[in-house]
Image (cartoon, rainbow, N blue to C red):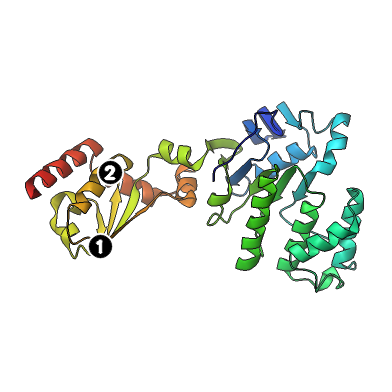
Amino acid sequence: MTSLIKATSPIVSLHNTSKHYQQVEALKNINLQLAAGEVLGLFGHNGAGKTTMMKLILGVIKASHGDVKIFGVDPLSRQAWHSRRNIGYLPENVSFYDHLTGLEVLTYFSRLKSVNKKQVIALLEQVGLTVAMNRKVKTYSKGMRQRLGLAQAFLGEPKLLLLDEPTVGLDPIATKEFYQTVDNLKSNGASIILCSHILPGVEQHIDRAMILSGGESRAMGTLIQLREQACLPVTIHTKGLNGILRDDPALNELRVNDNQLLVPENDKLAVIRKLLSYDHISDLHIEPVNLDQLYQYYLNDDCALKDKASNIPNVSNQSEALDRSEAVSS
């Protein structure tokens, strides 16, 4: 998604930041500048360092090396205390006092941020807990607890949000409403770090992605940048060709089935021109490399995708073959 990032000091800054636990390097030389109104997707397997990174930003733990700053100051310094009201945090596993009601829980957190009860009621309505707000939390389902956790993270309209697995336990409607809230907060200038294992549906709501593995940043950038760097093949879906892909020697080498091609990024335009030269074609759809494929690629886990890419004919040779084929057909 596009974003107008203001030319101001970063809301979050990590410079050559590392965190060691005895013999374990949880984070290694992480660099990040998060601007106002920017949404960063933070992705990685369990133990990749995502939670450690969030704890460093929150000031829960201290970096072993490097610098961490929020709103321009060290999160562990006294100067950072006044900024804490501007931070919202949702941990991966939310936990509340079971014998309090949802309303009582959120009211308790609202007092810590000096938020009035009107906003508490509004947030409970926003996350769909109005009917259940006077029930004790111990009667809540996992999804309801997660929605209550989101409500406490949104208290006080924070300028910085750290959300660890925010959509776990949410049904499709609640997930959609969550992302609508994220988009609204972003449009109001909030900076958001969103950590999720559920990749489908995330990509249209983030400005950049950081992929962690073993405490190291494997990749960071916009999805366009990550696609360009990976140069993975795109999928082209066609309709109406009725076996022509199989009969055309150049296209047959790229064929997945009679209606689908796996095409090197650099050959995309040449292939499209070739496909459009056939009168029988009734539809054409290009499926770009998605976030899940990029994630697997940068973690070196998607052997199948890499095998497909390596088996695709050489880019320059394939373009020449397409040109020759088109010349013959004309």
Q: Residues within 10 Å of mark 2 (few under 14, many from 20)?
A: few
Which residue is denoted by mark 2 in the rendering? 269
Counting from the top left corner in percent of width and height, residue 81 is at 87, 36
Q: Nearer the viewer, residue 197 or 215?
A: 197
SS state under label 1 = loop
Label 2 to label 1: alpha-carbon separation? 18 Å
Q: Nearer the viewer, residue 213 or 192?
A: 192
The vertical placement of 305 against 178, above or below, is above
Counting from the top left corner in percent of width and height, residue 180 is at 64, 57
Q: Hey, which quadrant is residue 76 in on the image? A: top right
Choose the circle earlier in sequence order: 2 or 1: 2
Q: Nearer the viewer, residue 44 or 167?
A: 167
Which residue is denoted by mark 1 in the rendering? 282
Residue name at image x 18 percent, y 62 percent: 280
Residue name at image x 66 percent, y 46 percent: 187
Q: Is residue 265 left or right of residue 97?
A: left
Residue 94 visible at all = no
Q: Which label belongs to residue 25?
A: none
Q: Hey, which quadrant is residue 13 in on the image? A: top right
The vertical placement of 31 against 245, above or below, is above
Q: Is residue 14 left or right of residue 330?
A: right
